[in-house]
Image (cartoon, rainbow, N blue to C red):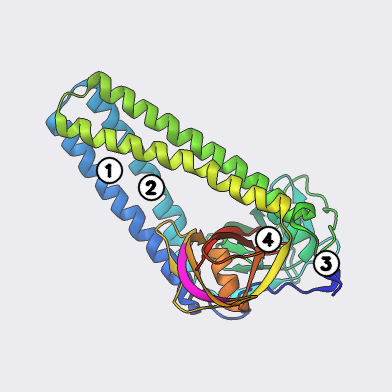
Amino acid sequence: MDSTQQRVLAYEPHPGEPAATDSLEVEIIQKQRSRLINSMVVYVVAAGLLLALDTDPASAAFAAFLAVATVYQSWLLFFRVLPGRKLLAYPSVLLTPGPGQLLVAGSKVSVVLPGPEPRWLVVRLPESKRILLAGLRRVYFIGPDPRGRVLVALPGGINGRFGRITTEPAPGSVEPPVPPRAMVAALRDPVVTTFLREVWRRSWGMAGFFVLLAAVLWTVNLTYFDLPYVSTFVTVLAVLYAVLGLMMPVRTATLSTAVKEQPWQELHATLDTEITPGASGGTGKAEGRVMLADGTARVLFQRVPLDLLVNVRDTQRLWVLGTPERGRKAVAGLPGYPVLGLVNLR
């Protein structure tokens, strides 16, 4: 088969239907809301107990850190999650911009809206999604709400980004080049390789943040905290942050090796369970079955991107890099789309 003619099926919303029709969309918002509220309660209680037990400068500084974290969580809740929940009641609208109707200025993408009056959808997208949109020419949005906000998503992904409806495109916008959409090896796929670079930057940034935070907590704990229960709590927190930070580049290295060395392979797959989103709303878990050369195997999706799960759910296909083997992990994704994750084959 000519790989340049092979069609890669991808998840897409249903135009004209409210996003809330998909129960997974609703559950993602609910999980994000619950996580933010629970974390704010924990931070406030921890800060209160810390100040009640000890009022030295170190305790006050740690309580101030928890207060800042609480403020940030509040901003996410009231300016991202709750407005997003309201937008789920709006129907999905598909835009297919032609020449001159898709413009880019840095990370800002402007797409013309149909109608007699000039209106543009403006949204910030990472480079991998800008390349995808320039080649695919398909974008969905729900809204706008009374403040002109919309949620924007591309085929192959379920999590949207906030944008706005404006009367003009972003200043300095120009028409982007149209990349080819031929199916190629992952190493030569501009969307996949650009997405991998973004994952590397994100993983190193988060690793540095968590390791630095762990080091600060450890130092403060050894220097200032005398109460055993306070010291134990801070020590455990520091160790958890350090481990979490160090695991991120390790996981990304596994994805990178597969992209550089392995070809794509398409497998027939089905999900046997519902998709359960994680607390952050970016990952989820499920179980299913996949057809290998020697028969059916179980596949476990644990903390994998929701984009990967919805593509398996809706297309009944699982794309993996390399030859899948029972009892081992495989790097899965979607050729030509910014989707990568690790799955377990049993």
Q: Nearer the viewer, mark 2 or mark 1?
A: 1
Which quadrant holds the N terminus?
bottom right
Residue at 44% x, 29% y: name it.
212
Tell me which amino acid carries mark 4.
Gly
Residue at numbered disc 2? 73
Q: CA distance from mark 1 to mark 4?
A: 44 Å
Depicted 93 relative to depicted 99: above or below: below
Residue at 83% x, 65% y: name it.
182
Residue at numbered disc 1? 43
- The answer to whether the residues at label 2 and label 1 have Cβ atoms under 8 Å apart is yes
N-term-proximal mark, 2 vs 4:
2
Task: Say which quarter of the image contains residue 216.
Answer: top left
Q: CA distance from mark 2 to mark 4?
A: 40 Å
Q: Provide the secondary structure element on which disc 2 rests.
A: helix
Q: Is residue 316 visible?
A: yes
Residue at numbered disc 4? 322
Tell me which amino acid carries mark 2.
Gln
The magenta region covers 284-290
Marking on residue 98: 3
N-term-proximal mark, 2 vs 3:
2
